[in-house]
């Protein structure tokens, strides 16, 4: 596997942007220079992240999300430690 992250990635297995091979490595997200740990999906080219909105769930049991726009910087945490 390469050390390049996809432009768009989701943690939801039902999403077309879900990639289990990438998610098995520890992916971190910096949004506007701050570490975010509750990111459900991101898109670097469009500059947004979807984060969980508290503990609220939709009728299918998925977390409700809010789309935030700004600078998105995904990285592999294991590559940062090396």
Image: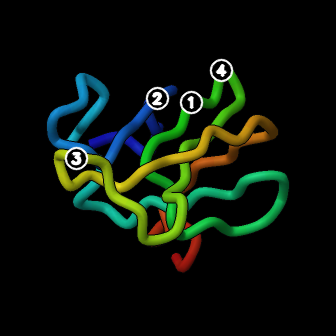
Dot placed on the residue nearer the N-terminal end, 3 or 2: 2
Residue 59 image label: 3
Q: Are marks 2 and 4 in contact (CB under 8 Å)?
A: yes
At label 4, counting other C-alpha atoms closer than 10 Å, the crowd grade (few under 14, some 14-19, many 20 or more) is few
Dot placed on the residue nearer the N-terminal end, 3 or 1: 1
31 vs 3, left or right, is: right
Percent position of residue 28, x then y: 53, 62
The CA distance from mark 4 to mark 3 is: 30 Å
The CA distance from mark 3 to mark 1 is: 25 Å
The CA distance from mark 3 to mark 2 is: 25 Å
Foreground label between 3 and 2: 3
Look at mark 2 in the image and give the residue it sits on.
Answer: 8
Look at mark 1 in the image and give the residue it sits on.
Answer: 43
Vertical comparison of 13 with 77: above or below: above
Q: Are marks 4 and 3 in contact (CB under 8 Å)?
A: no
Vertical comparison of 81 with 22: above or below: below
At label 3, counting other C-alpha atoms closer than 10 Å, the crowd grade (few under 14, some 14-19, many 20 or more) is few
Vertical comparison of 29 with 42: above or below: below
Foreground label between 3 and 1: 3
Q: Are marks 4 and 1 in contact (CB under 8 Å)?
A: yes
Q: Residue at x 36, y 40 (%)?
A: 10
Dot placed on the residue nearer the N-terminal end, 1 or 2: 2
46 vs 50, left or right, is: right
Secondary element under disc 3, as helix, strand or loop, is: loop
Look at mark 4 in the image and give the residue it sits on.
Answer: 45
Dot placed on the residue nearer the N-terminal end, 2 or 4: 2
Quadrant housing residue 50: top right
76 vs 61, left or right, is: right
Q: Residue at x 58, y 49 (%)?
A: 74
Q: Are marks 1 and 2 in contact (CB under 8 Å)?
A: yes
């Amino acid at each position: 596997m390469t050390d390049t992250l996809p432009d768009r990635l989701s943690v939801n297995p039902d999403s077309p942007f879900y990639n289990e091979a990438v998610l098995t490595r520890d992916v971190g997200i910096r949004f506007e220079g701050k570490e975010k740990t509750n990111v459900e999906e991101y898109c670097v080219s469009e500059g947004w992240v979807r984060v969980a909105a508290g503990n609220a769930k939709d009728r299918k049991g998925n977390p409700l999300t809010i789309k935030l726009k700004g600078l998105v910087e995904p990285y592999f945490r294991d590559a940062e430690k090396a």
